[in-house]
Image (spheres, rainbow, N blue to C red):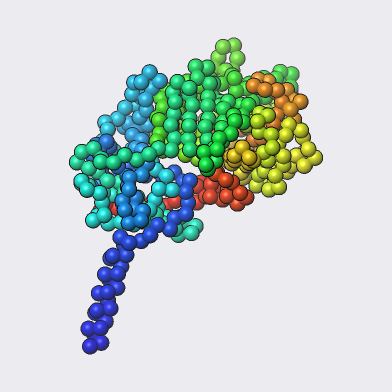
Amino acid sequence: MKLLASLLALSATILSLSTGLCAQTGTLTRQSDPVIVKGMQLSALRGTPISRCALYSSRGGTMNPVPFQTDEKNKDGIMSLTGPDGTPVNPDDGLWDANDELVFMARDLGARAGIKDMPAGCVTAVEIACADPVTGGAGWAYCVAFAGTPPEKSGRYVSYDLARDYINADCYEIGYTPGEMKSYFTTLILKDSGNTRSANLLDRYKFRVTLHLFFSLISITRNEDDMRSVLIGYKDGPIRAVRQCSNSIYLKFGIRSPTSIIDNYYYRDSIEWPTLIRLPFNVSTIASEGLLVSGCDWNPASTGMRYFNSCNPSPVLVDGVMSEEEIKLDKSPYLWSGLSGPQGSMLSRLWLSPSLVMGKELLYIDDKTIADPPEGCMGHWGYNGWSFNITTVPSGTHKFVSYFYFPENYKPGDEKAFLEIIDHPLRVSTRAL
């Protein structure tokens, strides 16, 4: 009898575990992480027409289509895009390959499901599991291939308007200068829950270099207007809009620097904006002093917002007048910074490649009386970013990435969720059902 009871208990345990695999509820609380699944992780779909695939998650016991996109890459690993004239750029074959990417948002993950739960017409399904390495929370989605066109459509989080060179996302809008080949944006509108929308808060994003040569006998200055950015191709979401640009900077005597090709990514509530610097020499061999300043200079519509960062958690008021508190801000290198107010909120952080050996400190000026041309409106309103001593930067190709996050209804502590996107990325695993 004891043996029979043990066998029955073991059978019940196995049954419980087997059914539990398909009955786990989603416990992942992270919302803003983009989930990028490499094609090599979806080997069961290899060779399947991308147009026949859709993404589903289980919510409330029902499988629902969720927004996603597939970013194809050609055999050289370069993203397939659409050129400004409508022609394909770096075209691929329209089939799932090992280097393609499936992209969706963590907010759309759901409970675990089984093959019996897949939508009608499913030919092949791959389970995508995402786990938070900090909390252990988990969520699932399912990439489903059909014999024909998927039966249901999902929504979008971001769109790109080529004619205006303008990105419209759920939590922000950002605009460039169409036809002018500028690398910087001059429009930034914040959105909050309830579809509230600010005025344009930005004067322009500034990027300025000063080099003192021959013991300061000669000085060379360059600013963001000296940079030329040519749009090569784009992708119009729905999860991330992509702008691929060829960038260079005017040097002297009509000579421009070597070009670098950069992909910028615009998600629902974040932006990933990499920059490459190519130097054929050590800066110290030609300059006794080099300074680079970079950051967002706001306009009068930002009045009333408050600036803070990881070294200065007590917010200071942005009003175009430099207060005692602003003058005394700790200029030590900070991990992240923020700007928040009735208009909305923006957080930012910067990643530097280890090869970028240079001193850095906080750049912050809130003084509307200081002219700083070129600019759209005179003066500074909460101009913040970084000041770099670039004299020690060695020759070579260097990369830094600016990240911008746009939290809804921000309150202190909310920055943690955005920091974890890079600091503790979600763990992604897959299996064919």
Q: Which residue corresponds to the image point at 25% horizontal and 41% vertical from the top-left?
A: 151
- From the viewer's perspective, is residue 17 above or below residue 165? below
Indicate the quadrant where residue 76 lies. Answer: top left
Q: What is the x, y in percent for residue 92? A: 30, 30
Q: Position of residue 331 (x, y in %)?
A: 71, 41
Quadrant where the N terminus sits is: bottom left
Q: Is residue 261 visible?
A: no
| Image: 168 above or below 87 | below
Residue 233 image offset from top left, x and y in percent: 41, 25
Residue at image x 48%, y 24%? 165
Horizontally, is 368 left or right of 56 in the view? right
Towards the viewer: 88 or 107: 107
* Quarter of the view holding residue 224: top right
Tell me: 63 left or right of 402.
Answer: left
Depth order, front residue of 256/223: 223
Q: Count numbered badges in the picture.
A: 0
Residue positioned 44% across, 23% down in the render: 162
- Residue 305 visible in the displayed image: yes
Q: Residue furthest bottom?
A: 1
Residue in the foreground of this view, choosing between 66 and 289: 66
